Image (cartoon, grey):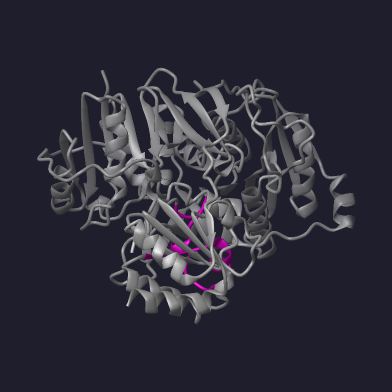
Amino acid sequence: MKILVGVKRVVDYNVRIQVNPDGSGVATNGVKMSMNPFDEIAVEEALRLKEAGKAEEVIAVTIGPKASQEQLRTALAMGADRAIHVETDEEIQPLTGARILKALTDKESPKIVMLGKQAIDDDNNQTAQMLAALSNWPQATFASKVEVEGDVANVTREVDAGLETLAVDLPAVISADLRLNEPRYVKLPDIMKAKRKPIETVTLADLAVEQAAAVKVLKTSAPAQREAGIKVESVDELVAALKEKGLI
Amino acid sequence: MSKVLIIAEHDGANLNGSTARAVTCAQGIGADSVDVAVFASDGSAVAGQVAALSGVSTVLQIDNAANEQAVAAILAPQVQALASDYSHVLVPSTTFGKDLAPRVAALLGVPQISDIMRVESATVFDRPIYAGNAVTTVEAPAGIVVGTVRTASFSAADAGGSATVEKREVSAELPSHTRFVKLETSGGGDRPDLQAAAKVVSGGRGVGSEENFKVIYDFADKLGAGVGASRAAVDAGFIPNDHQVGQTGKIIAPELYIAFGISGAIQHLAGIKDAGTIVAVNKDPDAPIFEVADFGLVADLFEVIPELEKALG
């Protein structure tokens, strides 16, 4: 079976982002870009399923501008077999992203689509669920454990109440949470090898996908900051302060 | 004219506190009516609790054996069937709502707005991006607005309502491809729910081990507080995942938050920004948590906690 895994180019998680003073967005010029960390976990899980003999091929997909190919190369260096770049300079919101992935799943017929649960830029946490809805496939979001047996995946999910397990018939969409695995480090020879792996480039028009009605961003602003308070010197001082506020 | 439908979160017996916060968000929209749907195998008890929230117009009780567990793939087509009567569908931004709302939106062919933290109008909302390091003001396009409500941004609707409860049949084709197997809870006992607790005591990597977390639990019990943790503490296996506070864990807004041995990574701070008073105890005077703490104490948590317990009597 094939696994399709989604990869998004985002501002690196170590970057302290700056909001443009004119409200136009977040500064991305000259900022380090990386693969969305949740997507790295998704790629790793797909590779582990392949290494365990549960899948034959891992296909990495990205949607974005030309530069997004860097993140596909990372996925290929990790071990993905080939990659598809849906090239566009337009902003792609989750519903359109899900339509694109639906078009690709119709073409590639994977048994599992593995995505990160959210991208750390827009924090939407929507694409996996939307793809599952459009395909009428099961969804197993926020996965912390994936076990594939034949045509069924047992997925443990991190939910507010604890750990939930769902059994889903394949094909299914799975979204990766933080504790699903620890992604491998890419070694230099693998980076060299990845350069020879194929990347197919397609456009929205090739896939006959139209942009969905979009949410319009009116402005972006810096969040209200909490002021730092005071340092107390002792437990007595702390207790007195909390008592004064009526908190204890 | 706005008509809001909220999907209640519950465990079959009790309404989750997040639903009452979504009701407050709906009232901010200036809705003509706010209906709440309870999907369950027998939703009578939960529907009764919803009816008592002020601001709720009608409670829709949709009983179906398939709704015994909240499985998004099974609930979404039922929500879709109800949605045509409404201008808005809102769900709390908990793991329940985050799982369900995008599936509903995609079935309806509309985008979804995640983590609504402020309502400007019926179609304009603020939401956080980049782990809360920026806020965007967004406008939903024409059509039904589907959104998740960042519960820490809204107070809970008061009790004192007396909405009518209507039993509804919903005709929708329900899939059999997704089956609930089990839910393992960490068994918090009588401790208050983290997201509803007025006080939360949290531990981080500085607590050092699973055994040492007993100190945190005991102190929390003394205060009647919920127990939280940083991602580092959960990753280290000190405490189960459902205690994690932060961007990818729970976003909370207690009156009092006490952090022991938590350095304060951005992702953790994103989960506590709306707390009333933040207290931080950490050995490292440069820990970032002190930048947001109302009261900081540079000290060893294992010395501080016994002293605090003594002072509290």
Q: Which quadrant would residue B258 be assigned to in this image? A: bottom left
B210 w.r.t. A93: above or below: below
Q: Which quadrant would residue A30 be assigned to in this image? A: top right
A166 w.r.t. B97: above or below: below
Measuring from the top left, give residue B17's x and y in whole percent. Answer: 28, 51
Q: Which quarter of the figure is the C terminus of chain A placed in?
A: bottom left
Q: Can residue B78 be seen from the camera position used here?
A: no
Relative to B154, is B132 on the left or the right? right
Measuring from the top left, give residue B263's x and y in whole percent. Answer: 60, 61
Q: Can residue B155 be seen from the camera position used here?
A: yes
Q: Which quadrant would residue B149 be assigned to in this image? A: top left
Query: Who is closer to the viewer here, B263 or A232?
Result: A232
Query: Who is closer to the viewer here, B2 or B76?
Result: B2
Highlighted range, magenta:
B226-250
Residue located at (32% from left, 28% from top): B88
Relative to A71, is B30 on the left or the right? left
Query: Who is closer to the viewer here, B221 or B21?
Result: B221
Residue located at (26% from left, 17% from top): B1
Measuring from the top left, give residue A8's x and y in whole percent. Answer: 66, 40
**Residue at the bottom extreme, as displayed:** B211
Residue located at (39% from left, 57% from top): B256
Query: Who is closer to the viewer here, B12 or B72?
Result: B12
Relative to B123, is A21 on the left or the right? right
Residue located at (67% from left, 35% from top): A18
Measuring from the top left, give residue A152's x and y in whole percent. Answer: 48, 58
B154 w.r.t. B4: above or below: below
Determine if the magenta segment contains residue B227: yes
